[in-house]
């Protein structure tokens, strides 16, 4: 029997290797997917073999993650509950897809992942695996073994299994679009997050920094006039904004599984890009387009967060989003500082702004008759309704 395990190198999946091997008397094949996390994949592979892996795959999926997942998060201004740029949620269907590819290559239908019964990832992984391999037999050790985090650490030590140093304290998930932190005293929503929980937003530079992000059809293509591919833009903004201490999100989040949880995210590049993109959309769209797009963005974000990556409605929304972003070309200037960002200016060849109309000094003015007529017609529905209801 072969079991293909999605292997992150963290506590849950490392313990899962030995647990699966012992419980099912199986060969456990581990798969690590590189989506931009700061892991030493050679050491991660070594840890997998020490824990009992029979065979290990490391798959570089950074480019695919950016082009097929992160790009849509930008186009759709993906922010779950208005604050979370969906970094973890975006990566799960891609990881599941790669794990399924290995399972097919290894000629097995048994696939395992390390999600717990309290997390959102169990939904995301299960549905993504089923979408790519309908006959898959999904095994989830962390939903079965009834071990607490402390029990897992003890199990690992007793079996001589190497684990990451932070495994006994925080639960970390990371990719090139962001980093999430859970566990320990962070679980208390009234407790300030310790500085040792943060990694990419440690303030090592004081002051402020101005940058210009240039977009073509909704996609960032330049930083301060220098053309880059999207992956390099993300890395550049992560460093610039992160070094200033910007990009932290403290979020009391409504989980898919029915309760609230305190989630901490480090997402400097995502917040910079999405903020600029939203501003450019507002510059270009008509009021009706803007309101319509906001509704699309929220629905899309909910679908991705809830693990419904393969929902047909999501694909329809993306097609509409891409079509609407045909006009989202231009530049947005940001000022980044430790506590936030500020939009300094924007410019687009497709902006309908005109100083010949808007300027109070030299712009167009309607006549008094035109202004009074517009106001009368504009308010007629409201005033008539008020009159028949209240007299």
Image (tube, helix red, strand yellow):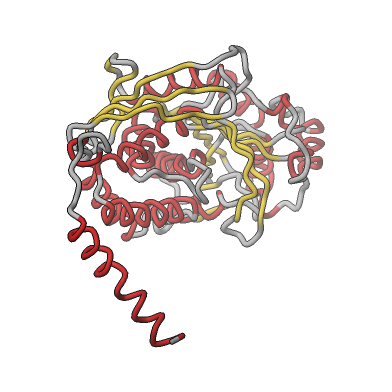
Q: Position of residue 71 (x, y in %)?
A: 34, 37
Q: Nearer the viewer, residue 391 or 264?
A: 391
User: Residue at horizontal 29%, vertical 27%?
Assistant: 331
Q: At 44% from the left edge and 21% from the top edge, which residue is drawn? A: 237
Count every numbered label the image shows and give the total.
Answer: 0
**What residue is drawn where x is 39% and y is 83%?**
387
Residue 21, how many percent across, how many down? 64, 41
Residue sitting nearer the eye, 118 or 142: 118
Residue 198 screen position, x and y as percent: 66, 26
User: Which quarter shows the C terminus?
Assistant: bottom left
Name which quarter of the figure residue 52 lies in. top right
Q: Position of residue 112 (x, y in %)?
A: 55, 47
Residue 340 as seen in the image, left or right of residue 219? right
Q: Residue furthest front?
A: 368
Residue 35 in sight here: no
Q: Is residue 156 visible?
A: yes
**On the rendered structure, is 308 left or right of 81?**
left
Query: Left or right: 188 with respect to 230?
Result: right
Q: Residue at x 37, y 81 (%)?
A: 385
Q: Which corner quadrant of the image does residue 9 belong to? A: top right
Q: 166 and 78: which one is in front?
A: 78
């Amino acid at each position: 029997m072969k079991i293909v395990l999605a292997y992150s190198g963290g506590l849950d999946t490392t313990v899962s290797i030995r647990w699966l091997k012992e419980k099912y008397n199986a060969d456990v094949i581990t798969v690590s997917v590189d989506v931009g996390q700061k892991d030493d994949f050679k050491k991660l592979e070594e840890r997998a073999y020490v824990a009992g892996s029979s065979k290990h795959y490391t798959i570089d999926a950074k480019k695919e993650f950016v082009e097929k997942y992160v790009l849509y998060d930008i186009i759709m201004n993906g922010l779950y509950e208005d604050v979370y740029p969906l970094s973890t949620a975006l990566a799960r269907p891609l990881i599941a897809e790669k794990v399924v590819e290995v399972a097919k290559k290894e000629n097995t239908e048994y696939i395992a992942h390390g999600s717990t019964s309290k997390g959102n990832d169990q939904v995301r992984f299960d549905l993504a695996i089923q979408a790519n391999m309908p006959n898959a037999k999904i095994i989830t050790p962390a939903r079965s073994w009834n071990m607490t985090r402390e029990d897992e650490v003890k199990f690992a030590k007793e079996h001589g299994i190497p684990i990451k140093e932070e495994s006994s304290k925080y639960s970390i998930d990371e990719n090139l679009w962001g980093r999430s932190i859970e566990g320990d005293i962070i679980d208390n929503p009234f407790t300030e997050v310790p500085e040792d929980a943060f990694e990419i937003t440690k303030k090592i530079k004081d002051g402020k920094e101005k940058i210009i992000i240039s977009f073509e059809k909704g996609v960032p293509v330049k930083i301060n006039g220098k053309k880059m591919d999207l992956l390099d833009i993300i890395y550049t903004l992560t460093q610039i904004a992160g070094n200033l201490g910007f990009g932290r999100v403290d979020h009391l989040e409504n989980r898919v599984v029915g309760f609230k949880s305190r989630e901490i995210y480090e997402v400097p590049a995502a917040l910079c890009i999405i903020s600029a993109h939203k501003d450019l959309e507002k510059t270009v769209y008509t009021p009706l387009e803007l309101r319509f797009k906001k509704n699309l963005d929220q629905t899309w974000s909910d679908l991705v967060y809830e693990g419904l990556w393969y929902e047909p409605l999501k694909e329809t929304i993306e097609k509409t989003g891409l079509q609407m972003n045909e006009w989202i070309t231009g530049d947005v200037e940001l000022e980044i500082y430790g506590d936030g960002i500020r939009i300094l200016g924007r410019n687009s060849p497709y902006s309908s702004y005109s100083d010949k109309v808007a300027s109070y000094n030299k712009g167009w003015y309607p006549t008094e008759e035109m202004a009074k007529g517009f106001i009368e017609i504009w308010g007629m529905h409201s005033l008539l309704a008020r009159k028949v209801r209240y007299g």
